């Protein structure tokens, strides 16, 4: 089973910059998870403690508003979600819902943080990648807001 997880990790873009020994460390912390279509992984504000690497399937990142849900981004195999699991005690910033069956590797935030403390090179690499994920989410949200509220978009829809 560990070899399967290690193989999945080696092919996941998230770990492209990791040293082989750090990929192996991640493999020891990974748990295989499967989610059915239309399953909520977490809701905005939840204190979900898991970080996920998507192996197969599609996940919608959404913001729920009264009477409507806005999709901020669609995540695919090779993407990641749940970075706030490493913020310990902070709620999720989006809702995550599967659009089809999803296979993922799950990591407990506390275990990842312990591994970061034990090996600062691993920790630095992980945090650099997570900052990249946060930047991507901010950009996706920004583009959605521009699309919804820019004067050009308003004229096009009128």
Image: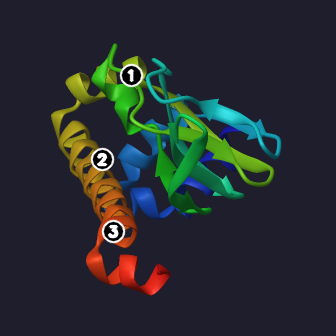
Q: Residues within 10 Å of mark 2 (few under 14, many from 20)?
A: some
Residue lying at the far top in this picture: please name it. Answer: 89
- x, y (%) of residue 124? 18, 43
Q: Which residue is mark 3?
A: 143
Secondary structure beneath label 1: loop
Q: Secondary structure at mark 2?
A: helix
Q: Provide the residue designation for mark 2.
A: 130
Position of 124 relative to 90 (above/below): below
Q: Which residue is mark 1?
A: 91
At which x and y percent is residue 104?
A: 65, 45
Q: Position of residue 80 (x, y in %)?
A: 48, 51
N-terminal-most mark, 1 or 3: 1
Q: Indicate the colouring scheme.
A: rainbow
Q: CA distance from mark 1 to mark 2?
A: 16 Å
| Distance in Å between CA atoms under marks 1 and 3 | 23 Å
Q: Is residue 131 left or right of residue 28?
A: left
Q: Residue at x 23, y 43 (%)?
A: 127
The residue drawn where x is 58% and y is 41% is: 96
Identify which residue is drawn at 42% across, 57% down: 14
Residue 110, image quadrant: top left
Viewer-nearest of discs 1 and 3:
3
Q: Do the CB atoms of the residues marked 2 and 3 lie less than 8 Å apart?
A: no
């Amino acid at each position: 089973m560990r070899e399967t997880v290690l193989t999945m990790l080696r092919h996941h873009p998230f770990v492209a910059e990791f040293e082989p020994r750090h990929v192996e460390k991640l493999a020891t912390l990974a748990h295989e998870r499967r989610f059915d279509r239309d399953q909520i992984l977490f809701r905005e504000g939840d204190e979900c403690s898991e970080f996920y690497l998507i192996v197969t399937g599609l996940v919608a990142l959404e913001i729920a508003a009264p009477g409507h849900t806005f999709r901020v981004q669609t995540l695919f195999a090779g993407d990641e979600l749940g970075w706030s699991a490493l913020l310990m005690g902070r709620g999720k910033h989006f809702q995550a819902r599967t659009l089809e069956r999803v296979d993922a590797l799950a990591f407990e935030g506390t275990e990842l943080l312990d591994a970061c403390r034990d090996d600062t090179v691993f920790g630095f690499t992980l945090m650099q990648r997570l900052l990249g994920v946060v930047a991507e989410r901010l950009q996706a949200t920004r583009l959605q807001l521009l699309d919804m509220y820019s004067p050009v978009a308003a004229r096009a829809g009128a």
